[in-house]
Image: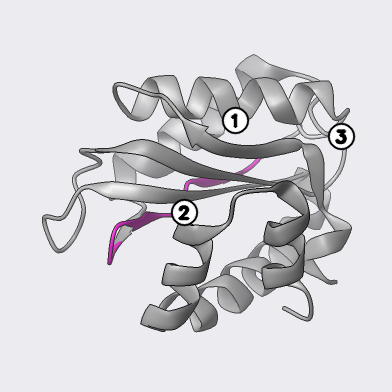
């Protein structure tokens, strides 16, 4: 599965203003709902929060990848936020977060799809030039070009 198959226009947020993790997740979740990827927002949010309680999803380098598998998801989905101002996310390296990829998959697709998406993103996000491109994008089309082939 290509990332471009699961990210939608409604799930991309460039210059998102969020004061904290909760505001960021709420905005991204609303986009996933609008795109028709979520059928039960409360159930999916619960899955996200349960995952975050097990350990931070802020992987370092100013990046967070909140994710959850839930019956609240109608289809696998990906949201992206480039934050206007960095926020604290209890990152492993202590740095604030400015780039967020939020992944949601239905419970029945949880095994393979969830892991494939995480691996594909993680492999790219360790490279500074890729993160710099994500910080520099100014349109959804530019973002889609950066994500092409992942």
Q: Residue 93 carries which label?
A: none
Q: Residue 28 carries which label?
A: 1
Quarter-wise, where is residue 85 in the image? top left
Of residues 107 and 45, the one drawn nearer to the viewer in this rendering: 45
Q: Name the residue under label 3.
A: 74
Q: Earlier in the sequence, mark 1 or mark 3?
A: 1
Q: Distance between the residues labelled 1 and 2?
A: 12 Å
Q: Residue 36: where, in percent of width, then height?
A: 88, 28
Q: In this view, does 99 lie above or below 43?
A: below
The residue lying at 42 percent from left, 70 percent from top is 132
Q: Is mark 1 on a helix, strand or loop?
A: helix
Q: Distance between the residues labelled 1 and 3?
A: 16 Å
Q: Name the residue under label 2.
A: 65
Residue 72 visible in the displayed image:
no
Left or right side of 130 for 119: right
Quarter-wise, where is residue 118 in the image? bottom right
Q: Residue 149: where, in percent of width, then height?
A: 78, 81
Query: Pointer 3: residues within 10 angstroms few (<14), some, or many (20+)?
Result: some
Circle 1 or circle 3, nearest the eye = 1
Of residues 90 and 132, the one drawn nearer to the viewer in this rendering: 132
Circle 2 or circle 3, nearest the eye = 2
Q: Earlier in the sequence, mark 1 or mark 2?
A: 1
Residue 61 lies in magenta, yes or no? Answer: yes
The residue lying at 81 percent from left, 40 percent from top is 9
Magenta residues, start to end: 60-70
């Amino acid at each position: 599965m290509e990332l471009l198959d699961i990210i939608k226009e409604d799930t991309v947020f460039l210059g998102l203003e969020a004061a904290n993790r909760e505001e960021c997740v709420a905005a991204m979740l609303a986009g996933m709902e609008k795109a028709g990827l979520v059928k039960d927002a409360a159930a999916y949010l619960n899955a996200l929060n349960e995952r975050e309680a097990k350990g931070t999803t802020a992987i370092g380098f100013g990046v967070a990848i909140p994710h959850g598998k839930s019956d609240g998801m109608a289809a696998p989905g990906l949201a992206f936020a480039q934050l206007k101002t960095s926020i604290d996310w209890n990152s492993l390296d202590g740095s604030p977060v400015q780039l967020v990829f939020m992944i949601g998959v239905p419970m029945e697709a949880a095994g393979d799809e969830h892991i494939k998406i995480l691996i594909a993103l993680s492999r790219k996000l360790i490279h500074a030039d890729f993160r710099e491109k994500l910080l520099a994008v100014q349109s959804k089309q530019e973002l889609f070009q950066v994500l092409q082939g992942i």
